[in-house]
Image (tube, helix red, strand yellow):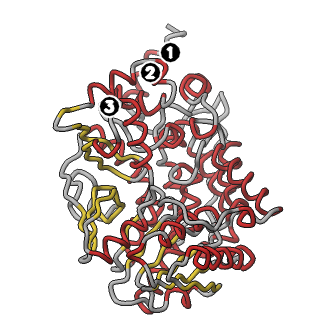
Amino acid sequence: MKIAMIGAGSIVFAKTLLNDMLATPALSGATYALMSPTESKLRRMEDFTRKMIRENGVDAEVYSTTNRQDAIREADYVICMVNVGGAKAFQCDYEIPFKYGVDQCIGDSLGPGGVMRGLRSIPVLADMAKDMDALAKPGALLLNYTNPMAACCYALGKVSNVPFIGLCHGVQTTLDLISGYVGVPKHEIDYIAAGINHMGWFLKLEHKGKNIYPIFKSKCELPEYYVNEKVRIEVMRHFGYFMTESTGHLSEYIPWFRSHKRSMEQYCDEPAFGGESGAYYKWTKLIDEKYSRVDYLEYESPKLEPRSAEYCSYILEAAATGNPFRLQGNVKNEGYITNLPQGCCVEVPVYVDREGLHPLRVGDLPLQCAALNQSNVTVQTLMVDAALNGDPERVMHSIAMDPLTTACCTLSEIREMTSELMTAEKEWLPQFVGKSLKPVPVISVPKDIKRADVPLDPALAIGKRFGTLAER
């Protein structure tokens, strides 16, 4: 089989996935096509992969190319891990909204940062799907790791019939946390999780037929456990279910935790991804600066390590062997979650085997969980439309409907921030060339203004008739 890896200049992540696949006997004989526009990183990854193949005696071939079509031609699988704009664009995603009072911890899935990342990424994925239609083997599967995951997969479902699945490790890592809290081995926990990427809900937690949610919830009420995941636990306390992504992520997707100093100090005071301002951008900048000075792979051992928790190699193994594998995948909603919109991207249990992907129908989510998901799906819907159609006004609408931004900014401020973001990132937004937001000037109202003689809103008329409380 041929496996194309688009964005293989992502040294740390590409190495992880390559290690996983080379360590999978069922993938013996595969050819790996590494593609990235950054040739220096790409050649280093190709050389290191050859070293892994040679020193571990793996039956595999590898080559690298800066041409995406060449990589995709005759591919059975295409793995997408692109990061359009890199650290330079990410700096704009974080620093510009911060000036307007929108404090993001991660900034890659929702919020102004997530919207801008979506505008950069979605057209690239849409073109990649077109390439697959024209050049890849019939039925070739696209495995997407690029964020914003839900918006990218939502767009793929709109523009192409290429089979795809979006992959994230939030469920696996959250199960590690739950396992530690309840004292039950991870592999013995029977669970159902569903929702949207980075905001899925554990609907069932059982061990040997016994509901262990009460045990988990009781542990979360203890300060020494609560402190690890304040935001996630607070949401569970009020909405009933634990969520599949970290406190740092979740704090950005809802309006209650990052919109003012008091809540930040109470709930987002843990370092790094526990809620720290700009945590992901700062980490990305550090890694980018570090590996621009030194070749990371030069100090890495080529010895194959045990496979990681990433789903990629297990999906390919199941397709090759026919042995079913269950995962949590991001797919087009075709009735899998019945109280979220048809066609949006949902994260549900998926089985994979030689016949392909088999998502499970979950039905209705608890109403309050669906409502929180819908607040994010609305932003994604507007973001996808903006990215595909190059409409600047739709960008503003998307950011304006973001729950955190809504809690922090006026509409005029959001328009000004959107314009500044689009100007700063124009080199990565070709679909907006020659387009800009329409100016909406602020209207200054003098205190002694004489009102126009027009019918007033009844409530305003009553106030005018009886005067203010101070006047009374």
User: What residue is drawn where x is 56% and y is 73%?
Assistant: 56
Calculate the distance from the C-alpha at mark 3 to the C-alpha at mark 1.
Answer: 40 Å
Residue of label 2: 463
Q: How many marks?
A: 3
Q: Position of residue 61 (x, y in %)?
A: 54, 85
Q: Position of residue 398 (x, y in %)?
A: 49, 55
Secondary structure category for the residue under label 1:
loop
Q: Residues within 10 Å of mark 2 (few under 14, many from 20)?
A: few
Q: Looking at the image, tell me whether mark 3 or mark 1 is earlier in sequence order.
A: 3
Secondary structure category for the residue under label 2:
helix
The amino acid marked with disc number 3 is: Phe
Relative height, residue 5 to residue 420 (above, below): below
The amino acid marked with disc number 1 is: Thr
Disc number at residue 468?
A: 1
Asked whether residue 382 is in view, the answer is no
Decide: marks 2, 1 in contact (CB < 8 A)? yes
Q: Looking at the image, tell me whether mark 2 or mark 1 is earlier in sequence order.
A: 2
Decide: marks 2, 3 in contact (CB < 8 A)? no
Does residue 54 appear left or right of residue 255 in this picture? right
Q: Residues within 10 Å of mark 1 (few under 14, many from 20)?
A: few
Q: Residues within 10 Å of mark 3 (few under 14, many from 20)?
A: some
Relative height, residue 150 to residue 368 (above, below): below
Comparing labels 3 and 1, the label whose residue is closer to the camera: 3
Calculate the distance from the C-alpha at mark 2 to the C-alpha at mark 1.
Answer: 7 Å
Q: Residue furthest top?
A: 472
The amino acid marked with disc number 2 is: Gly
- Nearer to the camera, 72 or 431: 72
Q: Position of residue 429 (x, y in %)?
A: 63, 71
Q: Position of residue 342 (x, y in %)?
A: 26, 62
Residue of label 3: 239
